[in-house]
Amino acid sequence: MNILNQYIKLVEFLGQTLGPDYEIALHDVRDNENSIIAIANGHITGRGLGSPITSKSAQVIEKKEYLSMDFESNFNTVSSITNKLLRSSTLYIKDNNELIGILCINFDDSKYSDISKQIMELCHPHDLIGRSSFEAIDEIIPSTESDISGSSIQEVARATIDTILQGSPIPPDRLTKDEKLEIVKALDDKGLFRLKDSVQIVAKLLHSSEATIYRYLNSIKKS
């Protein structure tokens, strides 16, 4: 019996129980390119059935981190489609210690943050809010540790590269060899190159040839 079949109804149940601000996604990690097999409230990230795994999930699989943990909770996810910063939690579904699926819950608290900001503006001057730590979620800067979701591998790769280059005025076609090598290493650490056609996609995004990306990967493995 496929263990994941038991979680498909759970996805619909949690989606209706938690409400429209929670996205529930079930991934079959045996098909990373089309891994979502059930999803509720997909409008939060803009994903649907057949969307790929996220950058963090790819990293967990690549480094086999799931062997030492059963779940992770309350970390940041960035949707490359809706450009929202979400609070996420994941459950690693295993069969005899082999990872077969991932159940993800992504919470969009943007409307609550907006209400909170409006309430603070009722009792504080605007300049005080600007000087204080009353931080709205859309002002939080995603880091390279943030998870990245997308409806295609290209979106995940592009958003990951954008996050790595955040704050840099240099466009990808002007990057040096060393800078591109660092980006490829960061993408490799995240497990992105486990996904089909990822080398071709990254090569286009970095304005490099596929052969160059393969050379970078070989150099990284040797080091």
Image (cartoon, rainbow, N blue to C red):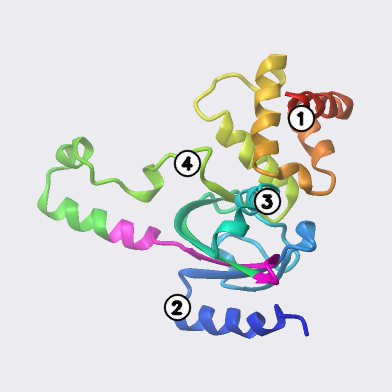
Earlier-in-chain disc, 1 versus 2: 2
Which residue corresponds to the image point at 86% horizontal and 25% vertical from the top-left? Answer: 209
Q: Quadrant of residue 174?
A: top right
Magenta extent:
94-115
Q: Amino acid at mark 4?
A: Pro
**Residues at discs 4 and 3 in contact (Cβ within 8 Å):** no
Q: Amino acid at mark 3?
A: Ala
In this view, the mark in front (2 or 3): 3
Give the CA distance from mark 4 to mark 1.
28 Å
Q: Quadrant of residue 68?
A: bottom right
What residue would you read off at disc 1?
221
Nearer to us: label 4 or label 1: 1
Label 4, on which residue? Answer: 142
* Sequence-first tag of 4 and 1: 4
Residues 176 and 191: in front is: 191
User: In this view of the protein, which residue sits in the foreground, 116 or 106?
Assistant: 106
Label 3 near label 1: C-beta < 8 Å? no
Judge left or right: residue 86 versus residue 161.
left
**Residue assigned mark 2:** 18
Compare marks 1 and 3 and give the one earlier in the sequence. 3
Q: CA distance from mark 2 to mark 3?
A: 26 Å
